[in-house]
Image: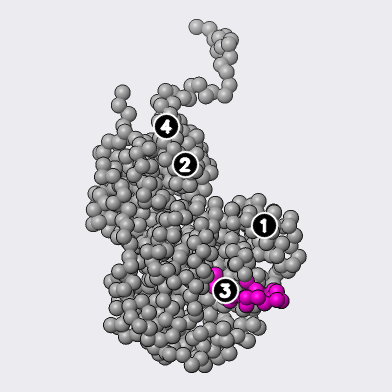
């Protein structure tokens, strides 16, 4: 049975999204291949010409670019960066990131909703990075987001699914793909996110700082696939932490 | 509304809060075990007791740096467009009493410099002027910034401190980052080494970063000239100052520099103010452990081997193709240098060295929105 990730009308086989921000450029292509990634995020601020090298030259053309608005401190700046991204030929996908705290780099949900609304109206496929809050997620649905990208833990922390219960609420309540982003430190955590019902997982630091980067990309690919398979297999029924009573509790009821 | 924090008085209150000689190995070990450290831990890491733990500090600093910044190291170059100065700072080559060749580049000369720098691929520059309002007025600097927009995506300023409305003007013309070195946070020493000029006013200088942020700048840089006074107190104060500014202005991007006065070689008597490479690395690692998110710049005052290794541990930004004279990028220098550089390598050479250390040179990590 087909199990594709659909974002903005586009179909993807892979549910592992790779971040590009922390890699050496010369290995990006190999890491994409080993991770089987079909979507790669990139900070537009790095894509814009610089030096002799442009990150865009290192990304295979069949991979969908997901430019992000990192550097934006409010909705207005995010919108301007997204428009610039489109002008530079990076396509209509955009990951909205609005951060105005340089210490923790936590997303500003309020400004994120505002930017999402403006960009969705302009025809962008908007994937907003957010702190997992149900009300914000609903606002993002209404604003026209194509998916919701809740953080698992502070970005770069490799701490795993610290916000697990809240992500589960989004999975239960929001009828858009939930893509777990930020804080995933190990393939086991990516697998767990997929088992919960996340539609995809994004990782960057965990792969970029691994001892063997290419092998870690493959480990993530397998973990994401495994978690997805487990979710589709109906994991919930076998994970009950108590057995069913052998004598039914309701056996005394008469017709 | 809570009462607004007065950063200057907080920094000065904390200046001699800790006796660095009193820390023990146990204090250092405690600090090294923590995920995030407080000011007391930070002081322990700057203390003499931490020196035997330098390797552990470096290991931890490296982990934090790579986690936050990945493999990327930003490249930039300073450009001196003037060297007129009205300050009399006893340690500085630009000291207004020094008989050096003074110069100021005109628009054409500045553009020629920009073109020469841009040809190396760099997208980030730091414009420096010396500190003379009379000779290098705000409009002159604003014009230089506006012109730089055609060639560079990120423009920083290291100029005399100015008022909020002037920072706002410079930001609107295209500058986004402001660096002001306090030199020393010991107010007595500050008066002794700054004999004349606007720079004598400690308070106006220490509040410059706040004014820059109020003027709309995106980020601010801090630094003490380590070795002018007790470097432990000064490095401690730099960290406190930067932390408090970030706390008050959470969006502000924070940058730190680590200039030092070099100790005399073969000086038989070890001076407690001496900042050798080990102490300099200790300071850099302590900065990283206190402020994992801060950019740390390593300048050409240091030798190439030190710089190449510092970027594998704690530094995240390195200058390349540096000329500290006036007009030295494109032509014969028109005016003298502020200090002697120890790493004259070109941009290409620094890029190669970064690759050799498995790091990714980053020319551009910024979108200017003005």
Type of colouring: one colour
**Residues at marks 1 and 4 on the same chain:** no
Between marks 3 and 4, how big is the CA–CA gap? Answer: 50 Å
Q: Position of residue B276 (x, y in %)?
A: 62, 69
What chain letter is assigned to the residue under label 4? A
The answer to whether B100 is drawn above or below residue B185 in the figure is below
Horizontal side, residue A150 vs residue A40: left or right: right
Q: Residue furthest top?
A: A255
Residue B264: within the magenta?
A: yes
Q: Nearer the viewer, mark 4 or mark 2?
A: 2
Which residue carries the number 2 mark?
A212
Identify the secondary structure beneath mark 1. helix
**Residue picked out by circle 3:** B260
Residue A80: % across, % down: 30, 60
- Residue B316: x percent and y percent? 48, 61
Query: A178 and B325: which one is in front?
Result: B325
Q: Residue at x 34, y 39 (%)?
A: A33
Task: Calculate the distance from the C-alpha at mark 1 to the C-alpha at mark 2.
Answer: 28 Å
Of the numbered discs in the image, which one, if any, rests on residue A222?
Answer: 4
* Residue pictured at 69% horizontal, 59% vertical: B52
Chain hosting mark 2: A
Is the residue marked by circle 1 packed among few (<14), some (14-19), or many (20+) residues within 10 Å? some
Mark 4 Cα within 10 Å, few/some/many (few <14, many 20+)?
Answer: some
Q: CA distance from mark 1 to mark 3?
A: 22 Å
Task: Provide the secondary structure element on which disc 2 rests.
Answer: loop
Estimate the spatial distance between the alpha carbons at disc 4 and disc 2, rounded to whole Å: 16 Å
The dot on residue B53 is 1
Kindly identify which chain the residue marked by label 3 belongs to: B
Give the magenta part as a residue range. B258-275
């Amino acid at each position: 049975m087909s199990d594709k990730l659909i974002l903005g009308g586009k179909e993807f086989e892979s549910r592992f999204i790779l971040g590009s921000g922390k890699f050496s450029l010369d290995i990006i292509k190999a890491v994409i291949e080993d991770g089987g990634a079909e979507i790669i995020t990139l900070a537009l601020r790095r894509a814009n010409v610089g030096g002799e090298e442009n990150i865009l030259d290192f990304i295979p053309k069949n991979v969908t670019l997901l430019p992000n608005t990192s550097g934006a401190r409010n909705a207005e700046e995010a919108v301007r960066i997204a428009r610039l991204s489109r002008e530079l030929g990076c396509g209509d996908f955009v990951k909205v990131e609005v951060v105005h705290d340089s210490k923790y780099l936590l997303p500003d949900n309020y400004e994120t909703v505002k930017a999402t609304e403006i960009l969705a109206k302009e025809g962008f496929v908007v994937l907003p990075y957010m702190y997992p809050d149900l009300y914000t997620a609903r606002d993002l649905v209404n604003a026209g987001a194509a998916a919701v990208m809740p953080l698992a833990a502070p970005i770069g922390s490799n701490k795993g699914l610290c916000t697990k219960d809240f992500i589960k609420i989004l999975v239960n309540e929001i009828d858009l793909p939930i893509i777990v982003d930020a804080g995933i430190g190990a393939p086991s955590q990516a697998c767990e996110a997929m088992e919960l019902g996340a539609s995809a997982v994004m990782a960057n630091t965990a792969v970029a700082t691994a001892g063997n980067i290419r092998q870690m990309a493959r480990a993530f690919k397998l973990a994401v696939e495994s978690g997805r398979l487990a979710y589709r297999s109906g994991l919930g029924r076998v994970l009950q932490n108590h057995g069913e009573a052998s004598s039914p509790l309701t056996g005394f009821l008469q017709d | 509304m809570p009462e607004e924090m007065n950063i200057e008085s907080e920094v000065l209150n904390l200046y001699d809060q800790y006796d660095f000689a009193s820390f023990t190995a146990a204090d250092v070990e405690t600090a090294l075990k923590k995920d995030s450290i407080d000011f007391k831990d930070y002081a322990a890491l700057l203390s003499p007791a931490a020196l035997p733990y330098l390797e552990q500090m470096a290991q931890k600093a490296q982990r934090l740096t790579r986690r936050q910044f990945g493999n990327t190291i930003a490249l930039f170059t300073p450009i001196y467009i003037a060297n007129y100065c009205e300050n009399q700072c006893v340690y500085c080559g630009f000291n207004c009493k020094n008989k050096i060749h003074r110069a100021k580049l005109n628009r054409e000369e500045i553009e020629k410099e920009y073109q020469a720098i841009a040809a190396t691929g760099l997208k980030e520059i730091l414009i420096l002027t010396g500190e003379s309002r009379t000779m290098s007025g705000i409009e002159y600097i604003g014009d230089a910034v506006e012109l730089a927009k055609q060639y560079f995506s990120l423009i920083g300023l290291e100029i005399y401190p100015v008022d909020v409305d002037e920072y706002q003007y410079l930001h609107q013309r295209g500058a986004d980052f402001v660096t002001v070195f306090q030199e020393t946070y010991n107010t007595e020493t500050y008066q002794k080494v700054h004999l004349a000029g606007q720079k004598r006013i400690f308070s106006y200088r220490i509040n410059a970063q706040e004014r820059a942020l109020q003027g709309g700048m995106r980020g601010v840089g801090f630094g003490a000239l380590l070795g002018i006074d007790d470097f432990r107190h000064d490095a401690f104060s730099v960290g406190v100052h930067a932390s408090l500014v970030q706390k008050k202005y959470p969006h502000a991007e924070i940058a730190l520099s680590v200039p030092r006065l070099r100790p005399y070689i073969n000086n038989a008597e070890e001076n407690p103010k001496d900042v050798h490479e080990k102490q300099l690395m200790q300071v850099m690692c302590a900065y990283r452990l206190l402020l994992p998110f801060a950019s740390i710049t390593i300048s050409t005052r240091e030798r190439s081997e030190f710089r190449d290794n510092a970027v594998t541990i704690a530094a995240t930004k390195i200058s390349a193709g540096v000329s500290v004279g006036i007009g030295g990028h494109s032509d014969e220098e028109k005016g003298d240098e502020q200090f002697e550089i120890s790493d004259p390598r070109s941009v290409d050479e620094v890029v190669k060295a970064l690759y050799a250390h498995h790091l990714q040179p980053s020319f551009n990590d910024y979108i200017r929105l003005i």
